[in-house]
Image (cartoon, rainbow, N blue to C red):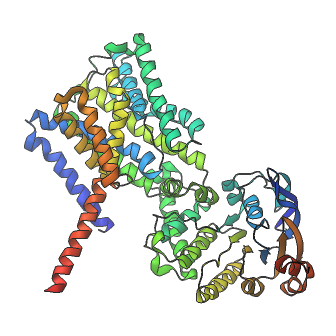
């Protein structure tokens, strides 16, 4: 198991946003996390990424407890994320955004940077090549020198994923990556995510576009009112009465 | 402009500055303005690393300027320590104090940070006036020696070159820092602290580093100032001084190479021109800050770039029509 959640719970005052969720994700899967609005998907994401400290339960990543750690520590362990609302470094160039994403993989300190040691220069050169390779994978290489805020909405989403991939994480959390994308952009996105998985990165994606989730993922978790109500492959999930009830409501 | 061209421009400008004493060496007023501007460039470039690149405000940098000035002044007058070593120790001590201060305040942002840094400036000022045995209190420290090489005392034009050397070195160091992994982490924190954290950047650590680095620059600038003027007293290290540093960065253009340089020249020139206004000087700076923030938030560097853009457009339109 790459990551396992045991009875993870998140309470905000009287509201239980995530309620005793237990789940496991295998390596090199593309997993989906779905559920109606307010089901607790983003809260669950934020707990894995270290943005929230769970009120209860355990999160184990490669058999190490990570709940309660800072986001930067969790990133250093090998979990990267994107945001539902785009959170790029707006006035940096597209290339620089990816370069920042690779921060934990680099070792240069302030002294070696000031003296431009051979090791530091080698590292910077390699960083440039790796970052450009990632941009090429997403088809953003032409925009490398542009300020990131000038990109279209869809391109900004792609860039967020590039930035996340740059640190070569073991697990990539994508929070609604297709939101606001055109149909063509979605097709490219699916291609890109598959490419990422092939490079050995496990992907967990929150997404509202059912067609996309069903086509992209191999395994799906369904949350409703903070509880995990179903899990299985896309066909199972589509046929699951609990899931249908959660999305369409009960008969009166 | 390519990297190569920029380097060429910078070298040419440095040579031009190095020739200044030959051209205007006998104009004492001009040399004073240049020397003070140079010291100011070192200090405000440091502040720019913190304020311009990392997005953390400090209204207390006079504290590090003071620590630098007093350390080197006291070491050389009371303990017979060599001036060069004194300048070095001054920088190191300012850095150490900055680290100690930065760790507890690194969680603060915006006006809270502004308030606490004002407090640090005030605290340092109070320490100086309340330790008269060491600092001379309101009397200050007098007869601070000039540096020397062997038996040759570096004075006048010679000291101009010392300042120029420090300016060049500090600007090179600054550029190397901001164009490295460290600098990218600083900028990422400025742009989006949450995302920076999620990208594996230890925000507290890098904020502390930015604070310490900027204090090193400002501390060394303080020492340079003390040995240049030869006399220091607490009045030179009040909140006004902190505001001046910030004004230099703001009006020149924060987070740029040229910003602090242009800003320092402008501020020192104005400062020397409006001496006659006495306590009304700060009024002028106040107006300056308000105008700068509202009309040219990117500073003079940004304003010039904008104007270049407009001019190019006008020329292009004109060319298209004819």
Image spot of residue B137 (x, y percent): 37, 13
The quarter of the image holding the N terminus of chain B is bottom left
- Identified at 54% across, 72% down, the residue is A131
Q: Nearer the viewer, residue B134 or A72?
A: A72
Against A183, residue A126 (above or below) is above
Against A110, residue A226 (above or below) is below
- Identified at 25% across, 23% down, the residue is B230
Q: Is residue A141 toward the left or the right of residue B129 in the image?
A: right
Q: Is residue B216 toward the left or the right of residue B100 in the image?
A: left
Against B288, residue B322 (above or below) is below
Image spot of residue B259 (x, y percent): 31, 51
Image spot of residue B217 (x, y percent): 39, 39
The quarter of the image holding the C terminus of chain B is bottom left
Judged from this view, the residue extending furthest toward the front is: A252
Image spot of residue A158 (x, y percent): 58, 76
Q: Nearer the viewer, residue A57 or A38?
A: A38
- Identified at 41% across, 50% down, the residue is B52
Can residue A183 be seen? yes
Can residue A203 be seen? no
Q: Nearer the viewer, residue B129 or B201?
A: B129
């Amino acid at each position: 198991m790459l990551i396992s959640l045991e009875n993870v719970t998140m309470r905000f005052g009287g509201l239980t946003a995530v309620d005793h969720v237990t789940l496991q994700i295998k390596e090199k899967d593309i997993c989906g996390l779905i559920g109606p609005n307010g089901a607790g998907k983003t809260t669950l994401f934020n707990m894995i990424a270290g943005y929230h400290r769970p009120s209860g339960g355990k999160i184990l990543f490669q058999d190490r407890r990570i709940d309660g750690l800072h986001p930067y520590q969790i990133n250093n362990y090998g979990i990267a994320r994107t945001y539902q609302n785009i959170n790029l470094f707006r006035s940096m160039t597209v290339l620089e955004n990816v370069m920042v994403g690779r921060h934990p993989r680099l070792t240069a300190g302030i002294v070696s940077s000031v003296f431009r040691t051979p090791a530091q220069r080698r590292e910077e050169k390699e960083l440039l090549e790796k970052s450009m390779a990632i941009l090429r994978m997403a088809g953003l290489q032409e925009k490398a020198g542009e300020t990131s805020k000038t990109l279209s909405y869809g391109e900004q989403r792609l860039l967020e994923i590039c930035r996340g991939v740059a640190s070569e994480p073991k697990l990539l959390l994508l929070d609604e990556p297709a939101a606001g994308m055109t149909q063509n952009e979605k097709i490219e996105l699916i291609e890109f995510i598959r490419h990422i998985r092939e490079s050995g990165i496990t992907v967990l994606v929150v997404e509202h576009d059912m067609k996309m989730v069903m086509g992209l993922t191999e395994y799906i978790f369904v949350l409703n009112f903070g509880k995990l109500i179903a899990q299985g492959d896309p066909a199972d999930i589509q046929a699951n009465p609990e899931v249908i009830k959660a999305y369409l409501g009960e008969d009166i | 402009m390519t990297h190569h061209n920029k380097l060429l421009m910078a070298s040419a400008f440095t040579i031009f500055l190095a020739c200044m004493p030959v051209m205007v060496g006998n104009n004492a007023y001009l040399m004073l303005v240049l020397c003070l501007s140079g010291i100011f460039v070192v200090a405000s470039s440091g502040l720019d690393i913190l304020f311009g690149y990392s997005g953390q405000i400090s209204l207390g940098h006079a504290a590090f300027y003071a620590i630098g000035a007093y350390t080197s002044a006291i070491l050389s007058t009371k303990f017979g320590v060599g001036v060069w070593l004194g300048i070095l120790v001054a920088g190191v001590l300012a850095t150490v104090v900055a680290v100690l201060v930065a760790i507890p305040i690194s969680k603060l942002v915006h006006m809270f940070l502004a308030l606490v840094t004002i407090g640090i400036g005030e605290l340092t000022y109070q320490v100086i006036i309340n330790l008269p045995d060491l600092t001379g209190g309101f009397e200050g420290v007098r007869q601070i020696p000039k540096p020397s090489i062997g038996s040759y005392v570096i004075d006048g034009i010679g000291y101009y070159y010392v300042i120029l050397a420090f300016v060049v070195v500090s600007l090179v160091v600054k550029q190397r820092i901001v164009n490295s992994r460290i600098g990218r982490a600083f900028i990422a924190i400025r742009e989006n602290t949450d995302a920076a954290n999620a990208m594996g950047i230890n925000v507290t650590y890098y904020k502390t580093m930015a604070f310490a680095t900027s204090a090193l620059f400002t501390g060394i600038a303080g020492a340079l100032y003390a040995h240049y003027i030869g006399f220091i007293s607490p009045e030179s290290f009040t909140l006004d001084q902190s505001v001046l540093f910030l004004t230099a960065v703001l009006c020149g253009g924060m987070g740029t190479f040229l910003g602090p340089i242009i800003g320092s020249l402008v501020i020192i020139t104005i400062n020397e021109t409006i001496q006659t206004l006495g306590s009304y000087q700060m009024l002028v700076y106040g107006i300056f800050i308000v105008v700068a923030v509202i009309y040219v938030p990117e500073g003079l560097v940004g304003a010039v770039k904008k104007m270049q853009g407009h001019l190019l457009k006008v020329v292009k339109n004109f060319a298209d029509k004819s």
